[in-house]
Image: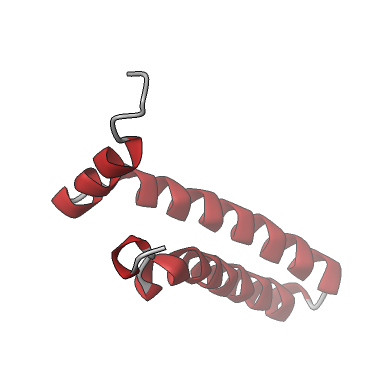
Amino acid sequence: MSRSSRPSMRDVLKPLELLALAAGMGLFTGVIALMSTRDIVIALIGFGIAFIVALVLLAMFALSIAPTDEEKRDIAEQDGPSSPH
C-alpha cells in the first residue's frame, strides 16, 4: 500500500469524532435528566435516546456534504478501469 493511498489521520478519526460528539450530547442530556429527576434509570434512558438521535443526525449531516474534488478523484480511482460500469 503506497503512502498516497493510505487514509489521512483526519479521515481515520472522523468516525471517532462523531461518536465522541454524540456521546457528549447524550451525556449532557443524561446529566440534566439526573439532576432534575434524581432517577438514574431516567437519566440512562435520556442518555441513550439522545446519543442515538445525535449519532443519526450527525451521520446524516456528514453524508449530506458534497464530496470535494480530491474525494471525487479518489472515488474514480477506486472504481478504476476494472469496473463493469
- Comparing 27 with 42, the one in front is 27
Query: Taking 22 as reference, is 42 left or right?
Result: right
Q: Quadrant of the N terminus?
A: bottom left
Query: Taking 83 as reference, is 58 left or right?
Result: right
Q: Position of residue 24 (x, y in %)?
A: 55, 74
- The answer to whether residue 4 is above or below residue 65 is below
Q: Examine the image and state in which quarter residue 28 appears.
A: bottom right
Residue depicted at 39% across the width and 75% down the height: 9
Residue depicted at 24% across the width and 50% down the height: 71
Query: Taking 51 as reference, is 76 left or right?
Result: left
Q: Position of residue 27 (x, y in %)?
A: 62, 74
- Comparing 76 with 63, the one in front is 76
Q: Quadrant of the C terminus?
A: top left
Q: Tell me, yes or no, if residue 66 can be seen here.
A: no
- Comparing 79 with 51, the one in front is 79
Residue depicted at 77% across the width and 67% down the height: 44
Q: Tell me, yes or no, if residue 32 can be seen here.
A: yes
Residue depicted at 45% across the width and 71% down the height: 13
Here the colouring is: secondary structure
Q: Examine the image and state in which quarter residue 19 appears.
A: bottom right
